[in-house]
Amino acid sequence: MNFCSHCGSAVRFAIPDMDNRSRYLCDHCGTIHYQNPRLITGTLPVAPDGRILLCKRAIEPRLGYWTLPAGFMENGETTVEGALRETIEEACVTGQNPSLLSIISLPEFDQVHLFYRVDMPDFEYATTPESSAVELFEIEQIPWQEIAFRTVTATLEHYQTHLKRAAIPVLNSTVYRR
């Protein structure tokens, strides 16, 4: 950040009084520009027969790799609303009965990924401009080597590990760069 979004003056990067980390500061209007992590919300859709829906990415990053439907949460929506919206946008699926499945922090990317397990009401799904393919997979048939993101792999592995339990616990994890 070079200029204040409030007054257009140059900003400096320093620790404000009574704070403990550097922020962009505008000496002209006094604005402190806080930058916070971005939330990515998504779902792990489960079909009536127990298969899992995955989407092949039609966009970067990780074009051509498989993922769960997910994306950036928008202002004015809850994490569940964002996850369900992304599921419609990427797979034309209206998920039902959302249950929090994983919360994964990515501190080096300033992101937090939240995934909900959702029921698919039927076997209806379709490709979209964001997904070149949308398919249902048995847990044993997941293309593990072609999964787009480590947070998706962690969520799928967590689901697989706890699949037979009456209630799946929430995965609370952190992913760092390799």
Image (cartoon, grey):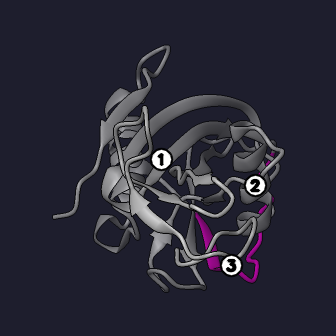
Question: As drawn, is 161 to the left or to the right of 17?
Answer: left
Place of residue 160 in the rendered image (x, y in percent of width and height, measured from the top left): 36, 39
- Most extreme residue toward the left is 178
Q: Nearer the viewer, mark 3 or mark 1?
A: 1
Q: Label 3 amino acid?
A: Glu
Q: Label 1 amino acid?
A: Val
Question: As drawn, is 87 to the left or to the right of 69?
Answer: right
Quarter occupied by residue 100: top right
Is residue 13 among the parts visible in the rendering?
Answer: yes
Q: Which numbered tag is attached to residue 74?
A: 2
Identify the magenta region. 122-135
* Label 3, label 2: how far apart the Cα atoms are: 17 Å
Name the residue located 62 percent from the left edge and 28 percent from the top edge: 99
Residue under label 1, please give it.
112
Name the residue located 73 percent from the left edge and 65 percent from the top edge: 91
Question: As drawn, is 63 to the left or to the right of 22?
Answer: right
Residue under label 3, please give it.
130
Dot 3: what SS?
A: loop
Quadrant for the C terminus, please.
Answer: bottom left
